[in-house]
Image (spheres, rainbow, N blue to C red):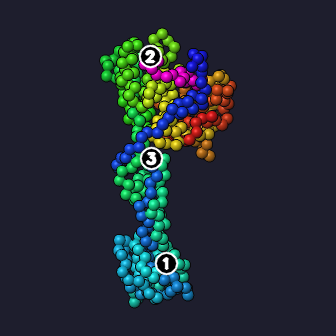
């Protein structure tokens, strides 16, 4: 790729997603399936309910007995959930029945307790007629044997866990979680476990990235800090190339000590792009080496986190089997002007506050320096300013990616 090439955000995202693949299918215990994506259609193993049941606590009757506008009927049996009625009811009889209990033969309606009263002789007074089928749940109303109840691609939520238990799916087919390695680079970095040195920079990128990926169900491995030395970097990169995804923080720009691109090329990696027309996050490398997809992330912490949001998280969610891979975008009204020079799209860290009508108002978190992590920590979302824009005016409607929520959509930003 020519050195001067700057891909648009959309083209770069499309190229990354062209290298996405869903993980192999594995079966995991139902108790561990929350949040995962079902990899095969799940079918019902029975009719549910398995027979006609009562939807209410009440009395099973023959609707014909109440057709004249009511009746007084003796109770001839009592059926609770789990019972198997052995006798049919005949004309002029009723049966006390509990919610979920099977309907006795001969009955075609249920009248709830609160719509009846008991006379002095113990007979049940039904003051009004009811239609056949009243308060009855029919056999197979919830699910039919062999019918697909959960399609491949469904996300496992608590309700889905209940459905899986209902069809006795003790081991759930899901897409394997990708393995991810995170490598920080730079002689200037001070590791968390190092002694305090006021002249060095604390290494925070790998921890922020770790948290971003943990939030979507990934458990990355941190590989530590590699020095700005080609041999040291080569050794560290080789440790990461046996993962599905390798994220390298720093060393991807054009400085004489930025060795990530040349070392990757020397290792046989194919570079697909290394600059994107976006701010922050311009010096982004994307490469592949066998089955490993490699991102050379900018060293500035906010730039690194924005690139993870726009490129890495969508790729990982596709690997997990999700259809909705991109952060949800919502319309907002701008509380102030936002300056912008055309040429690159921009992501501005903003807070979101609803007004009385429910409209979200976006306000800058303050400094938009790509090294200011506090502005990212305060942000509810990223205000998107298109590359063609010459600025946005106060009161205007714009789009914001909600990075503080866990909602996603199928399409990327325009």
Q: Residue at x 42, y 84 (%)?
A: 89
Is disc 1 placed on a helix, strand or loop?
strand
Residue 353 position in % (x across, y down) = 56, 39
Which numbered tag is attached to residue 367?
Answer: none
Q: Is residue 30 above or below residue 280?
A: below
Left-right relation of 45 to 3: left
Residue assigned mark 2:
266
Inter-mark Cα distance, 2 to 3 = 37 Å
Residue assigned mark 3:
39
Residue 171 position in % (x across, y down) = 36, 50
Which one is nearer the viewer's eye here, 357 or 242? 242
Residue 96 position in % (x across, y down) = 40, 79
Residue 351 visible in rendering: no
Which one is nearer the viewer's eye here, 37 or 349? 37
Is disc 3 placed on a helix, strand or loop?
loop
Which one is nearer the viewer's eye here, 372 or 185? 185
Magenta span of residues: 264-282
Left-right relation of 258 to 225: right
Q: Is residue 276 one of those drawn in magenta?
A: yes
Inter-mark Cα distance, 3 to 1 = 41 Å
Mark toward the start of the polypeptide (2 vs 3): 3
Mark 3 and mark 1 residues within 8 Å of each other at the beta carbon = no
Residue assigned mark 1:
109
Q: Quadrant of the N terminus?
A: top right
Q: Residue at x 66, y 37 (%)?
A: 397
Q: Is residue 354 one of those drawn in magenta?
A: no
Q: Residues within 10 Å of mark 3 (few under 14, many from 20)?
A: many
Mark 2 and mark 3 residues within 8 Å of each other at the beta carbon = no
- Which one is closest to the eye, mark 1 or mark 2? 2
């Amino acid at each position: 790729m020519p050195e001067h090439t700057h891909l648009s955000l959309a083209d770069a995202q499309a190229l990354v997603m062209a290298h996405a693949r869903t993980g192999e299918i594995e079966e995991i215990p139902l108790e561990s399936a929350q949040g995962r994506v079902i990899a095969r259609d799940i079918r019902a193993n029975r009719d549910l309910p398995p027979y006609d049941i009562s939807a209410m606590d009440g009395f099973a009757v023959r609707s014909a007995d109440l057709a004249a506008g009511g009746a007084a009927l003796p109770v001839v049996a009592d059926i609770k959930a789990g019972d198997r009625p052995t006798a049919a009811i005949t004309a002029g009889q009723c049966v006390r029945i509990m919610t979920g209990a099977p309907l006795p033969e001969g009955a075609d309606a249920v009248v709830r307790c609160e719509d009846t009263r008991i006379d002095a002789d113990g007979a049940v007074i039904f003051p009004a007629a009811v239609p056949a089928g009243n308060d009855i749940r029919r056999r197979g109303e919830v699910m039919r044997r062999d019918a697909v109840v959960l399609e491949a691609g469904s996300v496992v939520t608590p309700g889905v866990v209940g459905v899986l238990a209902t069809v006795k799916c003790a081991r759930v087919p899901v897409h394997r979680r990708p393995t991810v390695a995170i490598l920080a680079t730079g002689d200037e970095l001070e590791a968390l476990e190092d002694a305090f040195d006021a002249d060095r920079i604390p290494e925070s990128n790998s921890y922020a990235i770790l948290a971003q990926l943990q939030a979507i169900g990934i458990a990355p491995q941190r590989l530590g800090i590699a020095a700005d030395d080609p041999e040291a970097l080569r050794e560290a990169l080789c440790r990461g190339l046996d993962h599905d995804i390798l994220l390298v923080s720093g060393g991807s720009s054009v400085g004489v000590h930025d060795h990530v691109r040349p070392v990757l090329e020397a290792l046989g990696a194919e570079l697909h792009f290394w600059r994107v027309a976006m701010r922050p996050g311009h010096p982004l490398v994307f490469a592949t080496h066998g089955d490993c997809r490699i991102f050379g992330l900018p060293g500035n912490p906010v730039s690194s986190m924005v690139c993870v949001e726009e490129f890495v998280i969508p790729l990982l969610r596709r690997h997990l089997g999700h259809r909705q891979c991109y952060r949800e975008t919502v319309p907002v009204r701008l509380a102030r002007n936002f300056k912008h020079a055309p040429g690159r799209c921009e992501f501005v860290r903003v807070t979101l506050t609803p007004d009385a009508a429910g409209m979200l108002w976006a306000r800058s978190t303050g400094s938009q320096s790509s090294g200011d992590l506090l502005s990212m920590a305060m942000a509810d979302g990223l205000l998107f300013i298109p590359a063609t824009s010459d600025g946005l005016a106060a009161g205007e409607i714009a789009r914001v990616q909600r990075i503080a929520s866990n909602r996603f959509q199928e399409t990327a930003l325009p």
